[in-house]
Image (cartoon, rainbow, N blue to C red):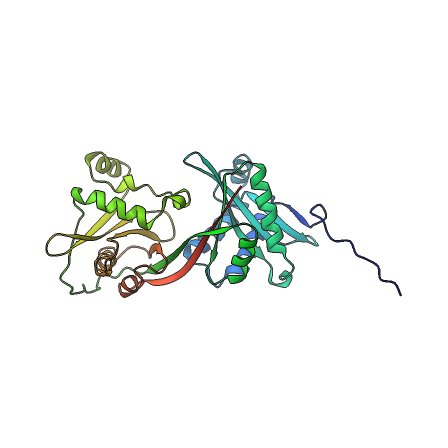
Amino acid sequence: MASIPIPARTAETLPVRPLNILRDLPAVADLIEMCFSSTLDDEGQSYIQQMRRASRDDRFLRWAGQVVDSASLPMTGFVWEENGRVVGNASLVYNRYKHKKLALIANVATHPDFRRRGIGRMLTERAMSHARQKKIDEIWLHVRDDNATAIKIYSALGFTQHAHRTTYIAKPDSLLPPTSNGLTVTRPQPRDWPLQRAWLEQAHPDELGWYNRWDWNQLAPGLWNWLYRFFIEFDIRQWAVRKENGELLATLSWMSTVRASDALWAAAKPGDDGAGLRSALEAARRELGHHRKLTLEYPAGEMVEAIQSAGFSARRTLVWMRATA
């Protein structure tokens, strides 16, 4: 009996369609939660809840239809639909930073029952094609460092690794005893600012500044910054750690946010053993004893012992990958 050849699916016949924010947000939120439930932190849970609230807000949906290229929620992207069911997703978030047009591919997820069919790869390719049609300069994505399969796929699609960053988390503890190490914790002095800024820029590279929106000028000393923070009620606290001879070893900054946890920004002397950073982190945990959870993002593999000794545990390490458009 002769076999009947089955034609391969082309891009036109694949069950891929653009995301429809008027109806897809709940299904995409459910899919993301299912696929990443074991690794979602407070921010991730908050993001999913935000998607669900947005899907029920008619005013938001009308507004979102006009700002698909600038909203933080997934207003643009592609879904894989079979029998009326969304089983795959790849979101696109567009951004501008220092005269560059950037795209972030996020939330690449495939329902467990539909995996090993190349759905995630095909959705990523479709998202990349859409970004290139918009003349994007760079396409970014991030993936957990323990997801070797995804890293291999993205590498084959032309992405290269540019940064490995670990997120740590800790609870404030007003009763935490200080470590006896001969170091002094004070507030930063104006003369510390050049070193502090240089160390911040080293630990938090500018090529990722578009994502986290780092603005180190907010931490700078000076009357105008103080007045700005005072009148808009924007709370910032900072710590500096020194040796007995006054040498600066580390600084740490805390900014109040509306997110699920509060962020710390660390800057440590290159090559230091980490004692200064540990003292700064412990001081922050004591002083912020009645605040929310604290998160710290830092280059993977750097100052690990010091950070963990201060009571922080690693939540995840992300590999940031970039493809030129």
Residue at the spot 20% in from the left edge and 37% down from the top edge = 222
Observer-nearest residue: 299 or 78?
A: 299
The N terminus lies in which quarter of the figure? bottom right
Q: Is residue 106 left or right of residue 115?
A: left
- Residue furthest to the right in view is 1
Instruction: Look at the picture and state if 172 lies above or below 59.
Output: below
Visible in this render: residue 255? Answer: no
Residue at the spot 37% in from the left edge and 62% down from the top edge = 314
Coordinates of residue 146 in the picture (x, y in percent)? 47, 63
Report which quarter residue 217 is drawn in. Answer: top left
Q: Is residue 122 left or right of residue 222?
A: right
Report which quarter residue 35 is drawn in. Answer: bottom right
Q: How many marks?
A: 0
Coordinates of residue 298 in the picture (x, y in percent)? 34, 55
Visible in this render: residue 231? Answer: yes
Observer-nearest residue: 78 or 127?
A: 127
Coordinates of residue 63 in the picture (x, y in percent)? 52, 36
Residue at the spot 12% in from the left edge and 52% down from the top edge = 246
Residue at the spot 41% in from the left edge and 42% down from the top edge = 210
Coordinates of residue 129 in the picture (x, y in percent)? 60, 43
